[in-house]
Image (cartoon, helix red, strand yellow):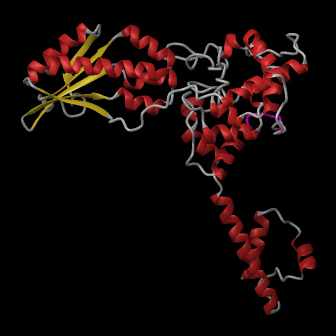
Amino acid sequence: MAGIFIKYFLLIYGVANIPAMQARTGACLDTGSGSGMNDAFNIMVAAGLLLLTMAVAAAPDGGELYAVHCAACHGDTGRGGVGVPLSFPSFLNSIDDDFLRRTIRHGRPGRVMPAFSKLSDAQIDAIVGYIRAWSDKPAPQYSSAPVRGDVVHGKSLYAGYCAGCHGENGEGGKGTGVTFSRRRNLPIIAPALNNPGFLAAASDEMIRHTLQYGRENTPMRSFLVQGLSEQDIQDLVSYVRSFETRPPPYREPAKEESRIIEVESGYTLEETVENLKQALVSQNFILIRTDTLEHGLVPEGEENPRQIILHFCNFSFLFDALTVDPRVGMFLPCRITVVERAGKVMVSAINPLYLSHLFNNAELDEYCHKMHDLYSVIIEEATL
């Protein structure tokens, strides 16, 4: 019986010449005949193959992991969205697998890309392998040795050749490059070179290679073609690396903020709703509609009339925020709810400062703080 079991696994794993294996190992791979030693050997081999099968079955699936953790921002096929296009040939063929691993592990603090600290090394390797399969070329290999150059000269070159896209202090391009109303207008937004996540992920050699050869079909042109020498490029790399010695370029968002802003009103529910409408107009918002909170969630006519929601918007503010990060649209238009319970009228809204932490976008923090202040003023005017 054990011999039949082994034959089955050998066929699965493509071992066609079973008699030859018998001759080499002395094992009895027949229908159970042979000595007790051969039977024991057969059982041991079968157990080993079974464990191998279990290990293969348990290996992380890169495609499934990508779909869960990456596709929402980078697209199902890596063509980009809020996140950069990962399957873009000149990008994928110029970065090594270590860059991808470290980017997934550490993210880009304050630049939308989160850190996936809870994924195992095996899971990250599986995602990297899945992404790498979009290229028909092997991953480049870069040395981890530092590049030595003149930082002062590199700073001068950076101002003339890099700051226009990457920012005066390496802060990177603005926004994500997409909104709900238009597709990405550039293949890749200039990354923040001063970001600790980028500096942890990119080796000096990889940065140098990018500067020397550029990235085809992007604004990133070869600096050799632009007339710089290899020594100039080394000086630039050294200057970019010097960003590591500076304070973090982003403000760490508060992580202990409550999820909602909630205030008790000193007025009746009806009076509070009317007060809110007036307060919205005074802060340059347009009231879109007033509805019961349960509208569409329960059969028509069964909504609780003592639970009201107001939808409102400032379209100029909306456009600016969407340009910075289109994910804001998931929480727009703005909403404030008024609910009467246990004899109290409570006014509440989602806390934009809590969202600031979730978005991991330092550019958006300014808007979240401004929106928090506006909510607080509106609610205060309506309830005091």
Q: In this view, does 12 lie to the left or right of 344?
A: right
Q: Residue at position x 40%, y 11% from top? A: 317
Which residue, as the protein is rendered here, is positioned at the far bottom? 36
296 versus 270 height, above or below: below
Nearer-the-camera pick, 281 or 200 = 200
Q: Residue at position x 83%, y 26% from top? A: 209
Q: How many labels does the image show?
A: 0
- In which quadrant is the C terminus drawn? top left
Nearer-the-camera pick, 333 or 115 = 115
Nearer-the-camera pick, 154 or 18 = 154
Q: Residue at position x 71%, y 76% from top? A: 47
Q: Quadrant of residue 198?
A: top right
Give the residues in magenta.
133-138
369 versus 341 height, above or below: above
186 versus 84 height, above or below: above
Q: Is residue 374 left or right of residue 50?
A: left
Q: Is residue 367 left or right of residue 81?
A: left
Whether residue 135 appears in magenta in the rendering, the answer is yes
Tell me, yes or no, if residue 215 can be seen here. no
Predominant SS of the magenta segment: loop
Whether residue 107 appears in magenta in the rendering, the answer is no
Q: Quadrant of residue 351?
A: top left
Image spot of residue 164 (x, y percent):
68, 10
- In which quadrant is the N terminus drawn? bottom right
Image spot of residue 310 (x, y percent):
23, 20
Q: Residue at position x 84%, y 25% from top? A: 149
Tell me, yes or no, if residue 37 can be seen here. yes
Q: In which quarter of the image is residue 19?
A: bottom right
Image spot of residue 66 (x, y percent):
60, 40
Image spot of residue 92 (x, y percent):
75, 30
